């Protein structure tokens, strides 16, 4: 659905994106995760065609956003962090304006559809200036949904909302994700865990990781301390002594405490230990915060 290959973007001598590559498949909800200034918004703007890039290639369902901007924009609904809303208009007037800009044919029925999907139909005659931040965000969602695009690109969709509004917007995103491909930019880690199936971590313009949250936790966790219980202490001890992935181990009641070189080797180690009478194996829970911290550490901090 979306394929980005070796894309770079510079402002003068400052390189904002550095040869980034990733793929988003149809029906996925992807979290674009990174600290402020990492390149998230620039990435999204290049995908939508609102910003040109210097090198590489982007394909949106087979279309290049630079050479085929109209085809690309029909496929994408874009919600920027601060959507441009004409506050002197009513909700209906604004959506009518956007629908005409998008050259939508059945305007009235399409506006009705998106207002119902975003639960703003009852306020259609209300001025946008009188709406709460949460309802303004819903209007932005409705505008992005006009034309029924296959892809939604959402830039910090819950930024500045109160806790109740955040809950409602997240519900809306998950509802949309049942039918659409979504790229969600955020620096709010619990939001990613709640909504997204896969994560792209970007930092200082470079892609640090592309994977499911669970796999990221496994890959980045190092020297994981695990606990096991066994029916055969001697046999288990013999197996542990032969495993390269086990850095160290010590005997505890009914089993062993062992340190693995990385949590990603857990299944391989467990497969060997099952024959030694192991009946319980506990691994540490790694948080997404820990994963994010490790992936975005500067070289100086890692040293």
Image (tube, helix red, strand yellow):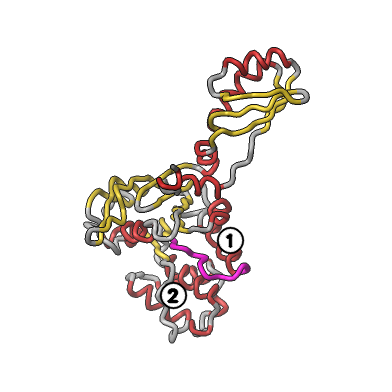
**Magenta-colored segment: predominant secondary structure:** loop
Q: Quadrant of residue 232?
A: top right
Residue 1 rendering spot, x and y as whole percentages: 37, 48
Sequence-wise first label, 2 or 1 = 2
Q: How many marks?
A: 2
- Quick one: 36 or 140, which is closer to the camera? 36
Mark 2 secondary-structure assignment:
helix
Residue 168 rendering spot, x and y as whole percentages: 59, 66
Q: Which residue is mark 2?
A: 108
Label 2 with label 1: CB-CB less than 8 Å: no
Residue 243 rendering spot, x and y as whole percentages: 56, 18
- Quick one: 208 or 56, which is closer to the camera? 208
Residue at position x 44%, y 65% in the image: 145
- Locate the C terminus and report the quarter of the image it occupies: top left
Q: Is residue 51 magenta?
A: no
Q: Tell me: residue 44, above or below residue 146.
A: above
Residue at position x 24%, y 48% in the image: 56
User: Is residue 166 in view?
Assistant: yes
The label shown at residue 171 is: 1
Label 1: few (<14), some or many (≥20) within 10 Å?
Answer: some
Q: Tell me: residue 104, above or below residue 288.
A: below
Q: Quadrant of residue 121?
A: bottom right
- Residue range of the region highlighted in magenta in the rendering: 154-164
């Amino acid at each position: 659905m979306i394929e980005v290959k070796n894309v770079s973007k510079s402002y003068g001598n400052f390189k904002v994106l550095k040869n980034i590559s990733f793929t988003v498949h149809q029906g996925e909800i992807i979290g674009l995760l990174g600290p402020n200034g990492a390149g998230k918004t620039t990435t999204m703007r290049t995908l939508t065609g609102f910003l040109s890039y210097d090198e590489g290639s982007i394909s949106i369902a087979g279309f290049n956003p630079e050479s085929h901007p109209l085809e690309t924009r029909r496929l994408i609904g874009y919600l920027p962090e601060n959507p441009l809303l004409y506050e002197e208009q009513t909700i209906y007037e604004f959506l009518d304006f956007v629908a005409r800009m998008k050259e939508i044919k059945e305007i009235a029925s399409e506006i009705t559809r998106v207002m119902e999907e975003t639960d703003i139909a009852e306020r259609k005659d209300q001025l946008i200036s009188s709406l709460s931040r949460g309802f303004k965000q819903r209007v932005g969602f409705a505008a992005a949904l006009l034309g029924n695009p296959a892809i939604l690109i959402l830039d910090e969709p819950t930024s500045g909302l109160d806790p109740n509004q955040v809950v409602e917007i997240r519900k809306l995103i998950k509802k949309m994700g049942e039918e659409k491909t979504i790229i969600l930019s955020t620096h709010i880690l619990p939001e990613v865990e709640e909504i997204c199936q896969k994560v792209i971590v970007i930092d200082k313009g470079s892609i640090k990781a592309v994977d499911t949250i669970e796999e990221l936790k496994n890959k980045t966790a190092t020297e994981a301390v695990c606990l096991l219980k066994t029916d055969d202490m001697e046999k288990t001890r013999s197996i542990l002594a032969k495993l390269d992935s086990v850095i160290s181990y010590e005997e505890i009641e009914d089993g062993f405490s062992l340190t693995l070189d990385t949590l990603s080797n857990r299944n391989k180690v467990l497969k060997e230990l099952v024959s030694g009478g192991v009946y319980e194996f506990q691994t540490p829970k790694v948080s997404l915060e820990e994963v994010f911290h490790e992936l975005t550490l500067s070289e100086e901090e890692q040293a």
